[in-house]
Image (spheres, grey):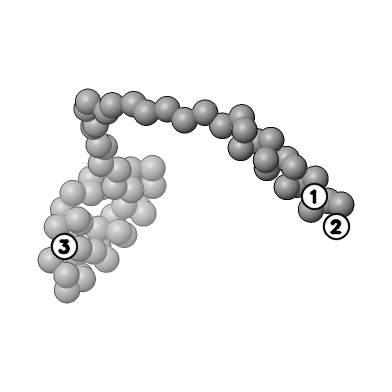
Amino acid sequence: MVAGRHFCAFLEDAAQALIGFEIEIQDLTGKLFLSQKRTEADRRSVIYHLERETSGTARDLAALIVP
């Protein structure tokens, strides 16, 4: 089990080298990605199927996708 001992030694050395830090986030901006990296045909298909779901949330999501 020599490999196991070497791995444990590696982990112990790596743990000694870890440095922690803390940062304060003052602003966070989100982006909305709704299938825009898909082809127009794919986006239209997604819209089509979402609009036929019984869930209102699915239909609301379909309205946000640009064909």
Mark 3 neighbour class, 10 Å CA radius: few under 14, some 14 to 19, many 20 or more = few
Q: Nearer the viewer, residue 18 or 56?
A: 18
Measure the C-alpha gap from mark 1 to mark 3: 53 Å
- Residue 27 location in percent, x, y? 22, 27
Horizontal and vertical percent position of residue 40: 33, 47
Specify which label sits upstream in the sequence, 3 or 2. Answer: 2
Q: Report helix, strand or loop for mark 3.
A: helix
Q: Gap in Å between the C-alphas at discs 2 and 1?
A: 7 Å
Residue type beneath disc 3:
Thr
> Are the residues tagged 2 and 1 within 8 Å (C-beta)?
yes
Which residue bears the numbered disc 1?
A: 5
Is tag 1's residue or tag 3's residue first in the polypeptide sequence?
Answer: 1
Q: Residue at x 80, y 45 (%)?
A: 6
Foreground tag (1 vs 3): 1
Q: SS at mark 1?
A: helix
Outermost residue on the bottom side: it is 54
Q: Residue at x 61, y 37 (%)?
A: 15
Q: Position of residue 36 (x, y in %)?
A: 33, 43
Mark 3 or mark 2, which is nearer to you? 2
Marks 3,2: beta carbons within 8 A: no
Residue position for label 2: 1
Instruction: Name the element at disc 2.
Output: loop
**Residue in view at x 34 percent, y 26 percent:** 23
Nearer to me, 56 or 18: 18
Q: Residue 19, how many percent across, how many down?
A: 52, 28
- Residue 33 is labelled as none
Instruction: Between residue 17 and residue 24, name the one nearer to us.
Output: 17
Dot 2 amino acid type: Met
Q: Which residue is mark 3?
A: 57
Instruction: Write down the quadrant of residue 55 in the picture.
Output: bottom left
What's the CA distance linking mark 3 and mark 2? 55 Å
User: Which amino acid type is shown beneath numbered disc 1?
Assistant: Arg
